[in-house]
Image: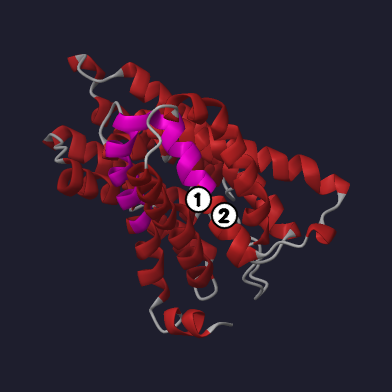
Amino acid sequence: MSHRSRGLDSFPPWSLAIGAMLSVQLGSALSVDLISKIGAGGTAWLRLTAGAVIFLVIGRPRLRSLRWHDAPILLGLGVTTGLQTVVFLAAIARIPLGTSVAIEFLGPMTVAAVHGRSRSALIWVGAAGVGVVLVTQPWHGAISWVGVGYAGLAAVGWAAYIVLTQRVGDRFSGLSGLAFTIPVAACTAAILGIPQTAGHFTVEVVVTSVGLAILLPVLPYSFELLALRRMTPTAFGTLMALEPAIGVILGLLVLHQKLSIVQVIGILLVILAGAAAQRGEQHRPATGDEGNVQPSTGPVPF
């Protein structure tokens, strides 16, 4: 373990988990300005490319460890990560950050409920759905349904990401799995990102992208990895239910996005349902190997 890792281990695990969520939502909020310049695809491509370089340097994956049967799952996770990143950024460009996160959170909630000990856990997914309706307030007609659609696709992407990440985590230790999949994600985002970035490629854009890559995904995943060494997956997953609230707070502070009382109630309902759904999830026993322990809702999407 590095000296830096030992230093971070001195922090309470719950503080590292909250730090991961703060980093994710701050990175998302700060991405909005870049999206206005180079689009969701361009932002995703540059951010993932910078993240891929960082993970290749710190993860130092061994190509000799790859097997042919690993290729489908690694490619699947990489493509899913790239697409999920693009559609989530497209969502926050159109609807408030807190609303986007609340809708996206339906993905991991559904995975938690399906894998729970009781099928009654699906009731909490329905409760979260009611919360999302309160957040979007379709009766007013002011919400961007394109943005809602993108957030819904992000929820599907996050659910798939969780399942695929757990399988990759069983096969690869530490950050090596990310070092293999993030470059694939960057190549996936490049299909839209390169055309959108053309003509807007400046030093400022590159530097901003590198900074955003550190906020998301480098810091969150590292914090999660350290937190999960000293937290049960259930405790971690329950804590993750706070993510929509953090999205609302940073949306207010950074983007000056305000929600009505009804929308706040909707967010609280999503948080309550998310925490309750996690309590019924089945978990694999901890192995003590930080590379093989996965959070109950999966690592934060990029």
Q: CA distance from mark 2 to mark 1?
A: 5 Å
User: The magenta stretch spans which residues?
Assistant: 23-49
Vertical placement of residue 7 versus 282, above or below? below
Numbered disc 1: secondary structure: helix
Q: Quadrant of residue 81?
A: top right
> Label 1 belongs to which residue?
50
Q: Give me the disc on residue 163.
A: none
Q: How is the image coloured?
A: secondary structure
As shown in the figure, which amino acid type bears the numbered disc 1?
Ala
Q: Is residue 139 above or below residue 6?
A: above
Task: Give how far across and how far down residue 54 sits, in percent.
Answer: 54, 59
* Residue type at numbered disc 2: Val
Q: Is residue 118 left or right of residue 271?
A: right
Estimate the x, y position of residue 16 in percent, counting from the top left: 40, 69
Determine if the magenta segment contains residue 139.
no
Q: Which residue is mark 2?
A: 53
Number of other residues with Cα within 10 Å of mark 2, as a class: few under 14, some 14 to 19, many 20 or more: some
Q: Main secondary structure of the magenta part?
A: helix
Q: Which residue is more in the foreground, 170 or 30?
A: 30
Reply yes or no: does residue 25 show up in magenta: yes
Q: Quarter-wise, where is residue 129 in the image?
A: top left
**Residue 281 appearing in the image:** no
Q: Is residue 22 visible?
A: yes
